[in-house]
Amino acid sequence: MAPVLLRCTLVAVALVAGAWLTVGLRVVALEDEGEKAIESARRQPLDSAEIERARDALESAQSLTADPAPELIEGRLSAATGRRDEAVAFAIRVIAEEPENVDAWYLAHVSSEDPKGLALTRRRVRELNPLLGDQLE
């Protein structure tokens, strides 16, 4: 391979890696905004502007990654702000895409108020992660 072509290839790879890392860091920062809102909601009620800001950050994060973490964080935010049905809906969307995602099953369990739903989610969490399943009692 010619030295110029090799250098150009290395520069292109470095640029792609840099862009990938930059996007990854941005996703982490956006997810952190959602996590901070959840922590705040546990201490005191959030106003609608704070909730909307966190949701916007998490939706932006979701648009930058294929990972379901931003959607699960948004579900946890819904649960923390008293919107349990909405939290279950987020969990179900993730479960539909990733049936083995124990975090989604756990979110569905802790957010569900339906006895049948609780039994199903408890059983599935236990199947996927017995240690976590033991904590559901």
Image (tube, grey):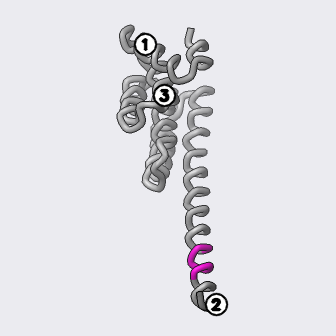
Q: Main secondary structure of the magenta part?
A: helix
Residue 40 to residue 62: above or below? above
Which mark is first along the chain, 3 or 2?
A: 2
- Does residue 94 show up? yes
Region in magenta = 9-14
Where is mark 1, residue-wise?
Answer: 118
User: Which amino acid is tagged 3?
Assistant: Thr
User: Which amino acid is tagged 1?
Assistant: Leu
| Crowding near the residue tagged with mark 3, few <14, some 14–19, many ≥20 C-alpha atoms within 10 Å | many
In the drawing, what numbered circle is on residue 41? none
Residue 54 to residue 43: above or below? below
Quadrant of the image occupied by residue 130: top right
The reply to whether callout 3 and callout 1 are in contact (CB within 8 Å) is no
Where is mark 2, residue-wise?
Answer: 3
In the drawing, what numbered circle is on residue 81? 3
The answer to whether residue 13 is magenta is yes
Residue 93 placement (x, y as % from top left): 36, 35
Indicate which label's residue lies in the foreground, 3 or 1: 1
| Crowding near the residue tagged with mark 2, few <14, some 14–19, many ≥20 C-alpha atoms within 10 Å | few
